[in-house]
Image (cartoon, rainbow, N blue to C red):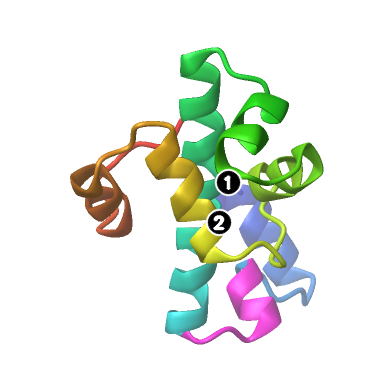
Amino acid sequence: MDKKKRKQLEEKGFRVGSAADFLELTPEEETYIDIRLDISSLVKTQRAKRGWTQEQLARAIGSSQSRIAKLEGGDPGISLDLMIKALLRLGTSKEQIGKLLEGELETA
């Protein structure tokens, strides 16, 4: 949001903040959500780079296409185990996953 719009809203009595502020997330919770979303994005990017469909990735890791769609969509019900398994099957190295967790790897 640009500064002018923010100032106008605040002058009218609105409180402006982030989603984390609204949801009252701790810094740890916010970081956890960011990591999950980054992994989801990287799975989708890596899958597309390989030219694989969601169905092909699902078969390769013993899952279903619908779970891959949920994984790529950031569904909180998808386990980190499945997310990491997908990344590894797509050829993502441990070092790349480490960089992702450190915030040093672009996901898109």
Query: 33 or 22, which lies in front?
Result: 33
Residue 7 image position (x, y, % from top left): 63, 61
- Circle 2 residue: 82
Depth check, mark 2 against mark 1: the one in front is 2
Residue depicted at x 44% and y 53%: 84
Identity, as a three-letter code, of the amino acid under mark 2:
Leu
Say which mark, if any, is on residue 2: 1
The magenta stretch is: 19-26
Identity, as a three-letter code, of the amino acid under mark 1:
Asp
Neighbor class of circle 2 (other Cα within 10 Å; few <14, some 14-19, many 20+) is some
Residue 76 image position (x, y, % from top left): 69, 66
Examine the rendered structure and indicate whether residue 55 appears above or below residue 88: above
Residue depicted at x 43% and y 32%: 90
Query: 52 or 104, which lies in front?
Result: 52
Neighbor class of circle 1 (other Cα within 10 Å; few <14, some 14-19, many 20+) is few
Examine the rendered structure and indicate whether residue 1 appears above or below residue 42: below
Quarter of the image for residue 12 reads bottom right
**Is residue 105 rendered to the left or right of residue 90?**
left
Residue 66 image position (x, y, % from top left): 81, 43
Residue 70 image position (x, y, % from top left): 74, 49
Look at the image and say whether residue 21 sits in the magenta stretch: yes
Prevailing secondary structure class for the magenta stretch in the rendered image: helix
Look at the image and say whether residue 45 sits in the magenta stretch: no
